[in-house]
Image (cartoon, grey):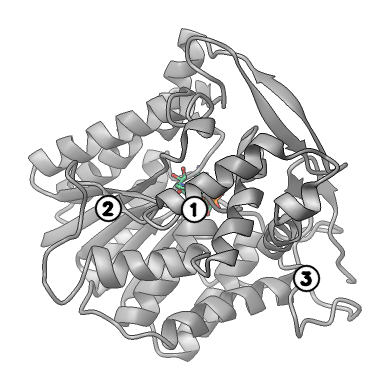
Amino acid sequence: MIITPKVRGFICTTAHPDGCRAAVKEQIDYVKAHKHAQGPKKVLVIGASMGYGLASRITAAYSFGAATVGVIFDKPASGARTASSGWYNTAAFEDLAHADGLYAKTVNGDAYSEDIKQQTISIIKNDLGKVDLVVYSLAAPRRTMADGSTYTSVLKTVGEPYTNKTIDLKNRVVSDITVPPASPDEINATIKVMGGEDWKAWIDALKAADALEDNAVTVAYSYIGPDITHPMYADGSIGKAKDHLFAASKEITAEGIKAYISVNKALVTQSSAAIPIVPLYISILYKVMKAHNVHEGCIEQMYRLLNEKLYNDSGAVITDEQNRIRLDDLEMQPEIQSEVSALWKTISTENLDTHADLEGYFSDFYKLFGFGIDGVDYEADTDPNREIQF
Ligand code: NAD
């Protein structure tokens, strides 16, 4: 099959298996080329097929030689449809990890369900006994409960509507958007999907099965960002869910397992592309951070998380005064933010090329689906079927 990108709204409905493999390999090579701390040896990553979760899995495997169990929710190829990029990433990761002598197994299914929790725990019990790090990196639009009811998360404000600039990525047009406030039910649903309830349920289930080492730690990911994004993000419906995630970290810690929130940088992923206003901010941020030589992608962030912040020579986890790990330190530097804010004030459709790194944005976006990667022959006929050994 000759596979080309088919973009609908803010997702690409096709993915390229060879491109995804090359992108995974690039991340592995990055980690291999850097020095490593002493870290965990048996790692569970929930949400392991894309973005920050995939980069966490790669970093744990290639920094520490860790055995990794990944939980993903992805589709294999079928008929004329390619597999999802998370499927190809995972097939490639497993293949490359196995060739390097590393243990890697994956469970494909809904991480919110009890069934997938139990399947995962039984693999851990049979193969590894216990894990010493649990990464919770789910980004999901909805959650189905045990009784079949469903909660759908929304990306809205809380309280007042908010108007600011956004970009129509398809037509490359900057215009104003008014984001409406979420209803109380929508806020509650967003907390159910993206808050800390399911993270805690995973830790409780692992504990009940005696599948956590005594010194096990767990980490989940959050975002804060600058004022322009606050009404939409930190103070919006997703921010309420992130507050809940933070509260869950305290609860989990109080109950005996050290739990951390890592505040990560804004990056192009399948999830962030869906948030109004944020992609325009990201493309300006890329421009400024690249000019200052401090731009990072998922793998650089997760490398720093696991080799400098959570594990390091001092043996102490490096946090801010609220016990949060800050990987957004470079993004939030005052000189970076003042340049972003100056560009934000004057950005328009006409000056997009000088004010934002739209090419960088699109390059990262296509790369998520395995497109636009050097060395991959996109004209070649390729088999869309790739195996994951379950
Ligand atoms: P992503 O979309 O790249 O990855 C999400 C992962 O979750 C994928 O592997 C997907 O398959 C998996 N997943 C989704 N629903 C699932 C389900 N029901 N069962 C099992 N797996 C499921 O997202 P991301 O941007 O890497 O986000 C991961 C975390 O990082 C989120 O908590 C997000 O809020 C946070 N974060 C993201 C950014 C950013 O800019 N992208 C910044 C800071 C924090």
Q: Earlier in the sequence, mark 2 or mark 1?
A: 2
From the top left corner, tell me how far across and down residue 295 is, in percent: 53, 65
Asked if marks 3 and 1 touch (Cβ < 8 Å), the reply is no
Q: Secondary structure at mark 3?
A: loop
Between the residue at mark 2 and the residue at mark 1, the CA separation in whole angstroms equals: 20 Å
Label 3 CB sits under 8 Å from any ligand 1 atom:
no
Figure check: 113 above or below 282? above
**Residue annotated with mark 2:** 325
Residue at image point 86% right, 76% down: 378
Q: Observer-nearest residue: 384 or 134? A: 134
From the top left corner, tell me how far across and down residue 111 is, in percent: 44, 45
Residue at image point 62% right, 62% down: 87
Q: Observer-nearest residue: 158 or 248? A: 158
Q: Which picture quadrant has residue 386? A: bottom right
Q: Which mark identifies residue 336?
A: 1
Q: Is residue 213 visible?
A: no
Residue at image point 9% right, 40% down: 255
Q: Amino acid at mark 3?
A: Gly
Circle 1 residues within 10 Å: few <14, some 14–19, many ≥20 = some
Circle 2 residues within 10 Å: few <14, some 14–19, many ≥20 = many
From the top left corner, tell me how far across and down residue 205 is, in percent: 24, 44
Q: Observer-nearest residue: 234 or 77? A: 234
Label 1 CB sits under 8 Å from any ligand 1 atom:
no
Figure check: 272 above or below 120? above
**Residue annotated with mark 3:** 372
